[in-house]
Image (tube, rainbow, N blue to C red):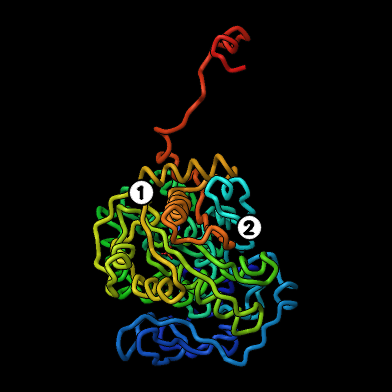
Amino acid sequence: MSAVLQSGTPTDDTDPLRGPTGRAVRSGAFGNAVALSCRACGARQPLGAEFACQECFGPLEVAYAPDAQVTRAQIEAGPQTIWRYQPLLPVPADVAGLPGTDPGMTRLVRAHRLGRELGIKKLWVKDDSGNPTHSFKDRVVAVALAAARELGFTVLACPSTGNLANAVAAAAARAGIRSVVLIPQDLERPKVLATAVYGGTLVAVDGTYDDVNRLATEIAAEHEDWAFVNVNVRPYYAEGSKTLGFEVAEQLGWRLPRQVVVPVASGSQLTKIDKGFGELVRHGLVDDTPYTIFGAQAAGCSPVAAAFRDGHDVVRPVRPDTIAKSLAIGNPADGPYVLDSVRRTGGAVESVTDDEIRAGIALLSRTEGIFAETAGGVTVATLKKLVEAGRLDPEAETVVFNTGDGLKTLDAIAGEVGPTATIASSYDAFEAAGLG
Ligand SMILES: *Cc1c(COP(=O)(O)O)cnc(C)c1O
């Protein structure tokens, strides 16, 4: 028998495994969440391990009790992790007992020097490389794992572009359960090794992420006790991204920023930052001030930017070819909803070339001492492009998201940077190299 998902307390082998489907949900298991609702047609269904609407096959998202009470004081008294936002997440009230790596409350850095360089008056970097496995994916995995436990799953799984693999393998290890991770075989070596080290099952697939995702969906249909965090428990997983928006608002002193620049892979993160801002307003936790959301993609995988540019509502899939592998989803599930968010808020989706991405990584490092992975290079380069094009207001307060750590994508800059000089170990050699 495999271990039941539990943390904090040892596994109770006498506790029978619950099946993932068709089970009554324990009262309070999902906090203030009350149902799954379809983003396309609005139909509701009970909380469970479902991701597609039974009426129209549209994507499901978590809906909450409209009268749920949430206060700033309650949040501020919580732990220094995403669990401080428990009343706004589909997780039980007892956050001390939640499994996983306890991500969140990463730093929000005032970027004076980058701002000066780009001509932006008030710029912040939300630096999510500080999470336990060094990307924002720890947030979504933590919420997915909590839901998976409540739904009785026994294995944590995912198809991944890299960072999700790290986060799932680590969280499963910490919860004492098996992980099964599927990746495209051409991923960056640090992301492969930083997944394998946790000891789960890691399968490198000969294909693109979109091929891997399709395979994972087939496997999920056959293995009913496997929680694929971004497939069959995706509605819960996606809620984890709201915490990026919650934290930015709280760290700014409980107010919304005027503009945000967010990377887009499947598009889930961007749409959930938007949802998070809306929930803060609805609960009276921040004033209802306008905000504009910009999306950032790599030119080598920019189906959402292309749809935005062409004024389309439909996102046409592409075959990715970019150094920004963590964003390389050619058929983004939430693409149309990204278009909704940016159009509704007066933003845009823009794309940048691999050279611009490398320059973006270097720019952020040189000005702020923050070494981003390629996805961070995408957002910084997109920020620069948007300012130069006059689309982003340089007078308005702006937050740019760095979602991952540069140490995982060293190859991207290996040809660009290196020692200033290589010398013999003598003072004469140092002088001769003109380094004084
Ligand atoms: C997965 C990922 C994203 C984007 O995620 P989506 O929610 O799929 O759009 C952004 N940055 C990094 C570093 C990622 O790993």
In front: 298, or 398?
A: 398
Q: For numbered disc 2, what is the local secondary structure?
A: strand
Closer mark to the observer between disc 2 and disc 1: 2
Q: How crowded is mark 2: few (under 14 residues within 10 Å), some or many (20 or more)?
A: some
In the orientation shown, which residue stands out farthest toward the top?
428
CA distance separating discs 2 and 1: 29 Å
- Residue at mark 2: 108
Residue where numbered disc 1 is placed: 187
- Image point (63%, 77%), residue name: 86
**Total numbered badges shown on the rendered structure:** 2
Q: Confirm if mark 1 falls within 8 A of ligand 1.
A: no
State ligand 1's quadrant. Answer: bottom left
The residue drawn where x is 51% and y is 25% is 419
Is 403 drawn above or below residue 113 in the view shown?
below
Residue 27 sits above or below residue 274 on the image: below
Horizontal and vertical percent for residue 215?
27, 65
Residue kind at label 2, given as amino acid type = Leu
Q: Residue at x 48, y 78 (%)?
A: 152
86 or 100: nearer the viewer: 86
